[in-house]
Amino acid sequence: MWDVVEITDPEAWNRLVSGFPITSALQSWGWGEVKRLSGWVPKRLAVYGEEGLVGGAQVLLRPLPGGLRLAYTPRGPALLRLSDLPRVAQALAHGVRGTHLVLEPEAGLPAEGPAPGFPGLLPEEPIQPAYSLWLDLSQGEEALLKGMKEMHRRNARLALKRTEISIEGEEAFLEFFRLFKETNRRARLLQHAEGYYRAVLKEMNQPHGEAFLALARKDGEALAAGLFVAFAGKVDYLYGGSSRAHPEAKAPMGMHLAAIRHAIGRGYRIYDLWGVPRTPEGSHAEGIWRFKEGFGGRRVQFPAYTLPLSPLYRPLKALLRLRKTWVNLRVRGNPRDVLG
């Protein structure tokens, strides 16, 4: 029997989960505090086996109609080995009560191969993006530029000539949010209220992690901005937006170069461009894919699993899928997910 211990100190929790080879910023203390704004209640649970600490999971709990409750570990749990996932999941089940426990360990598996199966766990539709692109920052800026597609290299050099790039904090939030809203309107994407993104910037500046804004300006006007979080050696590009003014400035490239330079300077190992579509051709996010894949890097997948905890799991899953399809139709006129 493995033991589960709840951790209630932010620094102790971040120190614990940042030490695992399989971990994520979404398992950090700050992310749990951000998700409180959306009705989730975080529990931080350390799992101990015969050999000591084997995993840690920030489990988000959400009440649902009818007395049901969803338990979810965003890009988690943190693990020493992916093979420990079934036993860690079973241990976590004793510390949470819900219809099912959704698991999304950030193993960064090759996108081309099949997702591994585990006894007792069912394949699940991920809540976070299932696919991403990772850039290896340890090779340095010049090697990263050489690994880009030719047009991206050209645009990167133009951006450095035509824009002023910078790393900033809360003082630049309104510039970021204006561009973010503008981009979401164009792409017909949902977004949270302004306070949610302010909370990300505040709460993810935490022990063993940071959050920052990267901007590209021309003549003082912000043309592209992104909100990034960093934790356990990785930098994640979570949210961004750009203006259609001055396309010749290549501002989105400038914004990413600002973040990449900052990340290399801080010694981070991986630059996560975040979500890319499962099948790029013909998807709502094809343009996102075309831009991101120009950076090179490797395409990775994050398979998700469910540990059913109640006979109500399957009907609840069907209802949640129906709701997601309805939202897609209402917002974009298409039942498919953005990154589907």
Image: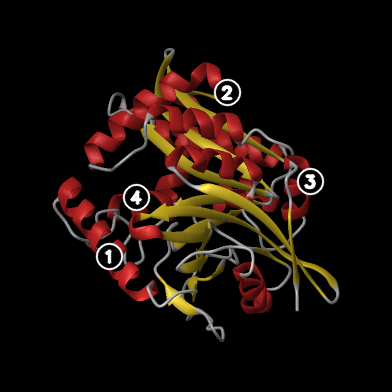
Check disc 3 and give the amino acid type: Ala
From the image, state whether disc 4 or disc 1 is nearer to you: 1
- Of labels 2 and 3, earlier in sequence is 3
- Of labels 4 and 1, earlier in sequence is 4
Q: Say which residue label 1 marks.
A: 319
Check disc 1 and give the amino acid type: Leu
In this rendering, position of residue 47 left or right of residue 173: right
Residue 169, labelled with which disc? Answer: 2
Query: Is residue 157 shown to the viewer in this render?
Result: no
- Of labels 4 and 2, earlier in sequence is 2
Residue 288, labelled with which disc? Answer: 4
Q: CA distance from mark 4 to mark 2?
A: 25 Å
Q: Secondary structure at mark 4?
A: helix
Q: Say which residue label 3 marks.
A: 12
Q: Position of residue 160 (x, y in %)?
A: 50, 29
User: Which residue is at 44% across, 13% downward?
Assistant: 220
Q: Secondary structure at mark 3?
A: helix
From the image, state whether disc 1 or disc 3 is nearer to you: 1
Q: What colour scheme governs how the chains and residues are painted in the rendered image of this protein?
A: secondary structure
Query: Is residue 79 shown to the viewer in this render?
Result: yes
Check disc 2 and give the amino acid type: Gly
